Image (cartoon, helix red, strand yellow):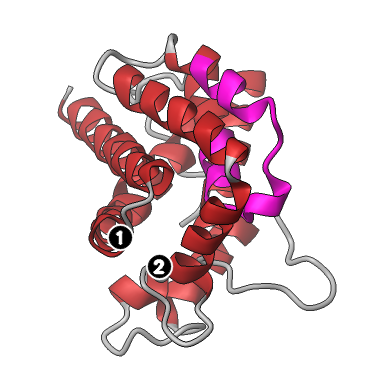
Protein backbone atom coordinates (compact mmCIF):
# COMPACT_ATOMS: atom_id res chain seq x y z
CA UNK A 1 0.00 0.00 0.00
CA UNK A 2 1.45 3.34 -1.00
CA UNK A 3 0.84 6.58 0.85
CA UNK A 4 0.75 8.33 -2.54
CA UNK A 5 -2.77 6.98 -3.12
CA UNK A 6 -5.06 9.82 -2.06
CA UNK A 7 -8.77 9.61 -1.30
CA UNK A 8 -9.98 13.11 -0.60
CA UNK A 9 -13.38 12.24 0.91
CA UNK A 10 -11.99 10.51 3.97
CA UNK A 11 -12.87 12.14 7.28
CA UNK A 12 -10.25 14.45 8.77
CA UNK A 13 -8.31 12.88 11.61
CA UNK A 14 -8.61 14.71 14.92
CA UNK A 15 -5.92 15.37 17.49
CA UNK A 16 -7.94 13.25 19.94
CA UNK A 17 -7.88 10.28 17.57
CA UNK A 18 -4.13 10.65 17.12
CA UNK A 19 -3.54 10.77 20.86
CA UNK A 20 -5.86 7.82 21.42
CA UNK A 21 -3.69 5.74 19.08
CA UNK A 22 -0.58 6.75 20.99
CA UNK A 23 -2.15 5.84 24.33
CA UNK A 24 -3.55 2.55 23.04
CA UNK A 25 -0.02 1.60 22.03
CA UNK A 26 1.26 2.39 25.50
CA UNK A 27 -1.62 0.52 27.14
CA UNK A 28 -0.74 -2.69 25.29
CA UNK A 29 2.92 -2.27 26.21
CA UNK A 30 4.93 -3.62 29.11
CA UNK A 31 3.51 -2.64 32.48
CA UNK A 32 6.93 -1.59 33.74
CA UNK A 33 6.81 1.18 31.14
CA UNK A 34 3.48 2.56 32.36
CA UNK A 35 3.75 6.19 33.45
CA UNK A 36 1.58 7.58 36.21
CA UNK A 37 0.11 10.34 34.03
CA UNK A 38 -1.15 8.04 31.27
CA UNK A 39 -4.63 7.43 32.75
CA UNK A 40 -5.16 11.17 33.18
CA UNK A 41 -4.04 11.82 29.61
CA UNK A 42 -6.49 9.23 28.31
CA UNK A 43 -9.30 10.69 30.39
CA UNK A 44 -8.63 14.09 28.81
CA UNK A 45 -8.52 12.58 25.31
CA UNK A 46 -11.76 10.70 25.95
CA UNK A 47 -13.76 13.90 26.21
CA UNK A 48 -12.85 14.85 22.63
CA UNK A 49 -13.56 11.48 21.01
CA UNK A 50 -16.83 10.71 19.28
CA UNK A 51 -19.68 9.87 21.62
CA UNK A 52 -19.63 6.09 21.27
CA UNK A 53 -15.92 5.93 22.12
CA UNK A 54 -15.88 8.36 25.04
CA UNK A 55 -17.29 6.05 27.78
CA UNK A 56 -15.05 3.17 26.68
CA UNK A 57 -11.95 5.36 26.80
CA UNK A 58 -12.95 6.71 30.22
CA UNK A 59 -13.37 3.18 31.54
CA UNK A 60 -9.88 2.24 30.35
CA UNK A 61 -8.49 5.35 32.05
CA UNK A 62 -10.19 4.45 35.32
CA UNK A 63 -9.04 0.83 35.21
CA UNK A 64 -5.55 1.93 34.19
CA UNK A 65 -5.26 4.11 37.29
CA UNK A 66 -6.33 1.13 39.40
CA UNK A 67 -3.80 -1.11 37.65
CA UNK A 68 -1.01 1.31 38.53
CA UNK A 69 -1.94 0.86 42.18
CA UNK A 70 -1.50 -2.92 41.89
CA UNK A 71 1.23 -3.28 39.29
CA UNK A 72 2.13 -6.91 40.16
CA UNK A 73 -1.38 -8.06 39.26
CA UNK A 74 -1.32 -6.09 36.01
CA UNK A 75 2.12 -7.46 35.17
CA UNK A 76 0.94 -11.02 35.77
CA UNK A 77 -2.11 -10.48 33.56
CA UNK A 78 0.01 -8.95 30.78
CA UNK A 79 2.51 -11.80 30.94
CA UNK A 80 -0.15 -14.48 30.80
CA UNK A 81 -1.96 -12.80 27.94
CA UNK A 82 0.87 -11.75 25.65
CA UNK A 83 4.17 -13.34 26.71
CA UNK A 84 3.70 -16.85 28.10
CA UNK A 85 6.20 -18.45 28.71
CA UNK A 86 4.30 -21.72 28.29
CA UNK A 87 1.11 -20.52 26.63
CA UNK A 88 0.23 -17.16 25.13
CA UNK A 89 -3.44 -16.60 25.80
CA UNK A 90 -3.94 -13.72 23.36
CA UNK A 91 -1.22 -13.42 20.75
CA UNK A 92 -0.37 -9.77 20.08
CA UNK A 93 0.62 -10.44 16.45
CA UNK A 94 -1.67 -9.91 13.48
CA UNK A 95 -0.18 -12.98 11.78
CA UNK A 96 -1.73 -15.23 14.40
CA UNK A 97 -5.19 -14.25 13.22
CA UNK A 98 -4.60 -13.62 9.52
CA UNK A 99 -2.16 -16.35 8.45
CA UNK A 100 -3.66 -19.81 7.77
CA UNK A 101 -1.01 -21.44 9.96
CA UNK A 102 -0.61 -18.45 12.35
CA UNK A 103 2.99 -18.20 11.13
CA UNK A 104 4.97 -15.12 12.06
CA UNK A 105 7.11 -13.30 9.49
CA UNK A 106 4.94 -14.51 6.61
CA UNK A 107 2.79 -12.54 4.17
CA UNK A 108 1.03 -10.52 6.87
CA UNK A 109 4.29 -9.43 8.50
CA UNK A 110 5.71 -8.54 5.08
CA UNK A 111 2.62 -6.53 4.15
CA UNK A 112 2.87 -4.54 7.38
CA UNK A 113 6.63 -4.00 6.94
CA UNK A 114 6.05 -2.79 3.37
CA UNK A 115 3.35 -0.41 4.58
CA UNK A 116 5.77 1.08 7.08
CA UNK A 117 8.36 1.46 4.34
CA UNK A 118 5.84 3.13 2.01
CA UNK A 119 5.25 5.69 4.77
CA UNK A 120 8.99 6.38 4.96
CA UNK A 121 9.80 4.34 8.05
CA UNK A 122 12.89 2.16 7.80
CA UNK A 123 13.40 -0.90 10.05
CA UNK A 124 15.31 -0.20 13.26
CA UNK A 125 18.91 -1.32 13.52
CA UNK A 126 19.61 -4.45 15.54
CA UNK A 127 17.19 -7.11 16.81
CA UNK A 128 13.52 -6.17 16.58
CA UNK A 129 10.11 -7.72 17.11
CA UNK A 130 7.88 -8.77 14.23
CA UNK A 131 6.41 -5.67 12.57
CA UNK A 132 2.80 -6.77 13.11
CA UNK A 133 2.90 -6.59 16.92
CA UNK A 134 -0.12 -4.73 18.30
CA UNK A 135 2.03 -2.08 20.00
CA UNK A 136 3.98 -1.34 16.83
CA UNK A 137 0.79 -1.09 14.79
CA UNK A 138 -0.77 1.40 17.20
CA UNK A 139 2.45 3.43 17.13
CA UNK A 140 2.34 3.43 13.32
CA UNK A 141 -1.29 4.52 13.31
CA UNK A 142 -0.32 7.37 15.65
CA UNK A 143 2.52 8.34 13.30
CA UNK A 144 0.11 8.54 10.36
CA UNK A 145 -2.43 10.49 12.38
CA UNK A 146 0.24 12.91 13.61
CA UNK A 147 1.47 13.50 10.08
CA UNK A 148 -2.09 14.11 8.92
CA UNK A 149 -2.79 16.62 11.68
CA UNK A 150 0.52 18.44 11.22
CA UNK A 151 0.59 18.62 7.41
CA UNK A 152 -3.07 18.43 6.43
CA UNK A 153 -1.87 16.35 3.47
CA UNK A 154 -4.64 13.89 2.50
CA UNK A 155 -2.13 11.15 1.68
CA UNK A 156 -1.56 10.63 5.42
CA UNK A 157 -5.23 10.42 6.32
CA UNK A 158 -5.74 8.03 3.41
CA UNK A 159 -3.00 5.71 4.68
CA UNK A 160 -4.32 6.03 8.25
CA UNK A 161 -7.87 5.07 7.30
CA UNK A 162 -6.76 2.22 5.07
CA UNK A 163 -4.44 0.73 7.67
CA UNK A 164 -7.03 1.06 10.44
CA UNK A 165 -10.05 -0.15 8.49
CA UNK A 166 -8.54 -2.70 6.11
CA UNK A 167 -5.81 -4.19 8.27
CA UNK A 168 -6.27 -3.53 11.98
CA UNK A 169 -10.04 -3.97 11.87
CA UNK A 170 -9.49 -7.40 10.33
CA UNK A 171 -7.74 -8.78 13.39
CA UNK A 172 -7.97 -6.52 16.47
CA UNK A 173 -11.56 -7.64 17.23
CA UNK A 174 -10.30 -11.23 17.31
CA UNK A 175 -7.51 -10.25 19.67
CA UNK A 176 -10.02 -8.41 21.84
CA UNK A 177 -12.21 -11.50 22.03
CA UNK A 178 -9.23 -13.61 23.08
CA UNK A 179 -8.32 -11.11 25.80
CA UNK A 180 -11.85 -11.05 27.22
CA UNK A 181 -12.07 -14.83 27.18
CA UNK A 182 -8.68 -15.42 28.76
CA UNK A 183 -8.40 -12.66 31.36
CA UNK A 184 -10.63 -11.27 34.07
CA UNK A 185 -8.28 -8.38 34.79
CA UNK A 186 -10.48 -5.26 34.59
CA UNK A 187 -7.88 -3.13 32.84
CA UNK A 188 -7.28 -5.54 29.98
CA UNK A 189 -10.97 -6.29 29.60
CA UNK A 190 -11.71 -2.58 29.29
CA UNK A 191 -8.75 -2.12 26.94
CA UNK A 192 -10.02 -4.89 24.67
CA UNK A 193 -13.44 -3.24 24.43
CA UNK A 194 -11.97 0.16 23.57
CA UNK A 195 -9.45 -1.17 21.04
CA UNK A 196 -12.13 -3.16 19.23
CA UNK A 197 -14.56 -0.25 19.20
CA UNK A 198 -11.89 2.15 17.95
CA UNK A 199 -10.86 0.13 14.88
CA UNK A 200 -14.48 -0.82 14.15
CA UNK A 201 -15.43 2.86 14.31
CA UNK A 202 -12.62 3.74 11.91
CA UNK A 203 -13.86 1.06 9.54
CA UNK A 204 -17.36 2.56 9.52
CA UNK A 205 -15.97 6.05 8.93
CA UNK A 206 -13.99 4.74 5.99
CA UNK A 207 -17.06 3.07 4.46
CA UNK A 208 -19.11 6.25 4.85
CA UNK A 209 -16.35 8.29 3.22
CA UNK A 210 -16.09 5.97 0.26
CA UNK A 211 -19.85 6.02 -0.28
CA UNK A 212 -20.12 9.83 -0.22
Residue 95 place in picture, x, y as percent: 39, 75
Q: Dot 2, crowdedness within 10 Å: few (<14), some or many (≥20)?
A: many
Cα–Cα gap, marks 2 and 1: 6 Å
Q: Main secondary structure of the magenta part?
A: helix
Quadrant position of the C terminus in the picture: top left
Q: Kindly identify the residue that appears in the image at 42 percent across and 32 percent down.
A: 60
Q: Magenta span has 40?
A: yes
What secondary structure is marked by label 2? helix
Q: Which mark is residue 171?
A: 1
Residue highlighted by disc 2: 94
- Looking at the image, which residue sits at the far top? 47
Task: Give the side of residue 204 with respect to residue 187, left or right.
Answer: left
In front: 18, or 190? 190
Q: Dot 1, crowdedness within 10 Å: few (<14), some or many (≥20)?
A: some
Which range of residues does the magenta coloring cover? 22-43
In front: 8, or 57? 57
Residue 112 place in picture, x, y as percent: 50, 64
Q: Kindly identify the residue that appears in the image at 52 percent across and 51 percent down.
A: 28
Q: Are marks 2 and 1 in contact (CB under 8 Å)?
A: yes
Residue 71 place in picture, x, y as percent: 61, 48
Q: Magenta span has 98?
A: no
Regarding residue 21, the answer to whether it shows in the image is: no
Amino acid sequence: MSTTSVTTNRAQITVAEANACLLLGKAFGLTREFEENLPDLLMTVADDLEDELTPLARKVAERWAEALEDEPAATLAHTQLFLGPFEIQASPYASTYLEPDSRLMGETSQFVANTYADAGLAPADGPSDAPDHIVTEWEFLYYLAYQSVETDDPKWSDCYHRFASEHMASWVPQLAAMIKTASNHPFYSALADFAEAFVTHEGRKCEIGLNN
